[in-house]
Image (cartoon, helix red, strand yellow):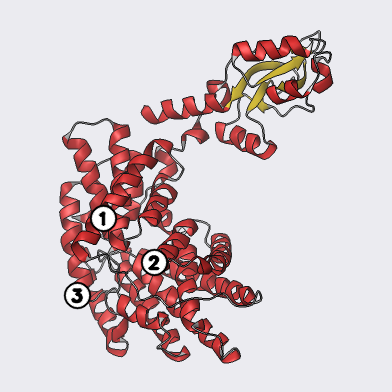
Amino acid sequence: MPYARGSGIPEVKYEFQTTAGARLSLRTVIGKFALGALAIGAGFSLGREGPTVQICAGLGALLGRLTHQGTRITRSLICIGAAAGIAAAFNTPIAAITFALEEIAGNLNQRLVGAIVVAAVAAAVVEHAILGGAPVFTIPAYAFGPWWELLAYGALGVVAAITATIFVKTLLWMRAAVRRLDVLPPWTRPAVAGVLVGAIGVAFPAVLGIGYQTLSRALLGEFGFTTMAALGVAKLAATIVSYSWGLAGGIFAPSLYIGGMIGGSCGAVVHRLLPDAPNVVGSFALVGMGAFFAGAIRAPITSILIIFEMTGDYAIILPLMVANMIAYTIAMRWQPVPIYDALLQQDGLHLADHEPAPLRRIRVDEAMTKVVETAAAAEPLSNLRERLAQLAINAVPIVDAEGHLIGMVTTKDAARGSPAHTAADVMRRPVVTAYGDQTLEAAVLKMARHGVRQLPVVLRDDPRRIMGILALHDVQVAASAARDR
C-alpha cells in the first residue's frame, strides 16, 4: 500500500486533477485507515485530519467508479469527500468548505459549492450525533485590548512565518535524504522513526500522538514560556521525523500544536510586560495556531475559519487576520512552493503538467465571440439604446469610418446621455482590450483590474482592428466546456 504513507492531501490534490485512480483506490483507503490508526495510536507525532481527507476522498472516487460516472463527476466526488473529511475531523463545516475550494479545487468552482456544503454539513451532523459535538480544544475567553496590541500580534505573525518556513524546508530536506538511503529497505524506515520519536518522547512525553489535550492546557495559560518553547521545538522535531521516515499521518494537528506553543511563548513574553492583561497567553496561543497553519499549509482563509468556528468569538478575528496574513505573505516569499505541491514534486509529480487550470490553458481567440456588433461614432444614443436592448448585450465597440476601434459604450453610458447625444459624446476611451493569443486568465485579471465585463479583442500588429469581443459569459462557457471534457 505505497500510497498510504504521509498525509494523503497531496495524493488527493493529484487525483482531483488527474483521476489516475491508484492513490485513492480501495486498497489505499483501507491501508490509510489501518496504518494511520496504528501510527497515531502508537504515539507518532502526526494528525488524523490528512488521513481522514484521503479516506473520504477515496470513498468519493470509489462511488464514482462504482456508478460509472464520467471524469467530471468523479473529480467532484473526490473534492466533496475531502470536504466531508475535514468537517468530520474538526467539526468545522465552514472551514471544510473553504479548504476544499482553497486547497483541493484551487478555485471557487460554482458547480461544487452546493454539494460541498451539503457534504460538510452532513459530516458535521453525523460527527455531532456520534461523538457529541464537543469542541476539539478548550478555548479561553478573549477580549481585544488597546489598538497597539495588534503590533504584538503582527510580530507573532513574523515569528510564525520563520518557524513555519524552518518546518517546511527541514521536512522536505529530511524526506529527500531518507529516500536516498538505499542501505535501508523502505519497510524498515518507520522503525528508525520509532526509535527517534521515542527518544524525543522520553524527554517530552507531551509531544507524542496528536496532543490536543496538551494544546488545550496551553490555551488555558497553564504553561510558562520555557515549557511552551521547549514543547514547540520538540513537537516540530518529532513531526518532521515521523513524516519524513514514511509513517501514515497528517501535519494539520502538529501544525496547530506547534503554532499554539509558539503563540503561547510570545504571549508569555507579552504577559510579563502587561501583567494585568487577561488571558493574554491563551489568546496568543490561539492566534499562533492560525498563523503557523497559514504559513505552513498555505490555506490562510481556512486557518482563520477553523479558529473562528472553534471559538465562536468574533473578537479574535482581527488579530487572527493580521497575524495570518503576515505569516502567509512572508512564508510564501521564503518558500514559494506550497508544502503539498513540494511533496508531489519530490515524488516526480507536477500538477501543472497534467491539467492546468482552464483559464490558463485556453486562449482568448478560442473563447471570444467572433461576430461583433459595432456602432459608428455619430450614431444617436436613442438608436444605440434600442440596439443594445434588442441584442441583449452590455456594451458595443465604437468604430470610425475605416472600422478602427476608437471607444466603447456600455448600457450605463448610453443611459446617462440624452437622446440628442451621439455615441461619441458618451463613449469611454482609451479602450481596454485583449489580444487573441493571451490566456483567459490574463483577460479576466484585466477585466477585474479595470472594472469591465467585456474586452474587444484586437490584433497585436494593428491594435485598432477588432477581431472579436470577449465577455464574462464567454469565459464561463469555455471554462465549463473544458472541465466537462
Give the secondary structure at mark 1. Answer: helix
Give the secondary structure at mark 3. Answer: loop
Label whose residue precedes the other's in the sequence (2 or 3): 3
Q: Amino acid at mark 3?
A: Ala
Q: Amino acid at mark 1?
A: Val
Residue 438 picture location, percent across and down: 60, 30
Q: Is any part of residue 229 visible from this angle? A: yes
Residue underneath mark 2? 310
Which quadrant of the view contains residue 342? Answer: bottom left
Task: Answer left or right for 185 relative to 137.
Answer: left
Q: Is residue 102 above or below residue 272?
A: above
Point out which mark residue 309 bears: none
Residue 9 picture location, percent across and down: 33, 55
Residue underneath mark 1? 125
Q: Is residue 47 above or below residue 227?
A: above
Q: Is any part of residue 463 visible from this angle? A: no
Judged by depth in the image, the label closer to the viewer, 2 or 3, is 2
Label whose residue precedes the other's in the sequence (1 or 3): 3
Residue 126 picture location, percent across and down: 22, 56
